[in-house]
Amino acid sequence: MTYIVWWRRPWVVPLMLVAAAFLAFSVPPYLTLDPAQSRLRPPEGNDLYYPLLVAHVLFGTVAMVTACFQIWPAFRTRHRRGHRITGRIYVFAGALPAGLLGLYIGWHTAAGPSVRVANLVGSALWLAVTIAGLRMARQRRFGEHRRWMSRSFALAMSIVLSRVVNVVATIVLTPQVNTTFGGSEELMRYSAASIGVWLSPLLLLLVTDWVLERRKGGARKAQAATARSEP
């Protein structure tokens, strides 16, 4: 039975592998607690930035790992208590603290105003949809809960896609350094980063809502077919 479930949801394993690879690459430098190993340059004179960045990374790691279990259909169906526990961990030890810290980290980014606004908007949206999903669960409106939490998980995973988009944007924009960017490689890198942090959450939210609407339409058709078949 497990074999059938896995193959009916072929995206589960690739998603977990991608998340694991991303975390294995991104998290270890921050476990050293050495600011020199940081992938983001701390602002000069801001001693609070790096400790909060490390906390943001660790809370984000919790969110990403628990999100994988939350959207794993077999786990959600067969281990309902585990689903509730990992859901609470995702919200209170992952998304909410990571989102709040993301507001601070985003405000102090060195990558320019466009990236700053994108990070602030992304963190605020992540907090908003997560809180909406939590409220729906407490009101026992589980259909709406799943919809809002699906959006929350999409935003949690958007950082992975943003890194990919950033690389592609850098490759595309590099030949334009001496024309569009007036010889400034730094401006080109900031522009590539801006494309990544804006485009990635937008794409994932659009895909998520498309999937949700498609499933909703399929459920309506199934209900209509059942109603027609009844005497």
Image (cartoon, rainbow, N blue to C red):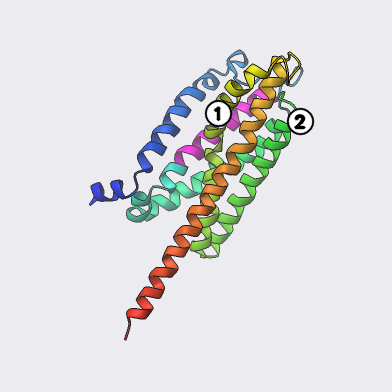
SS state under label 2: helix
- Residue 184 showing in the rendered view: yes
Q: Is residue 30 magenta?
A: no
Q: Position of residue 230 (x, y in %)?
A: 33, 82
Which residue appears at 65% of the width and 41% of the height? 122
Q: Quick check: 74 above or below 49?
A: below
Residue linked to disc 2: 113
Is residue 208 positioned above or below 61 on the image? Answer: below
Magenta: main secondary structure equals helix
Q: Earlier in the sequence, mark 1 or mark 2?
A: 2
Q: Quadrant of residue 126?
A: top right
Is 65 contained in the magenta span?
yes
> Magenta stretch?
48-66
Q: Secondary structure at mark 1?
A: helix
Question: What number is the disc on residue 163?
Answer: 1
Asked if one can make out residue 91 in the rendered structure from this viewpoint, the answer is no
Amino acid carrying mark 1 in the image: Arg
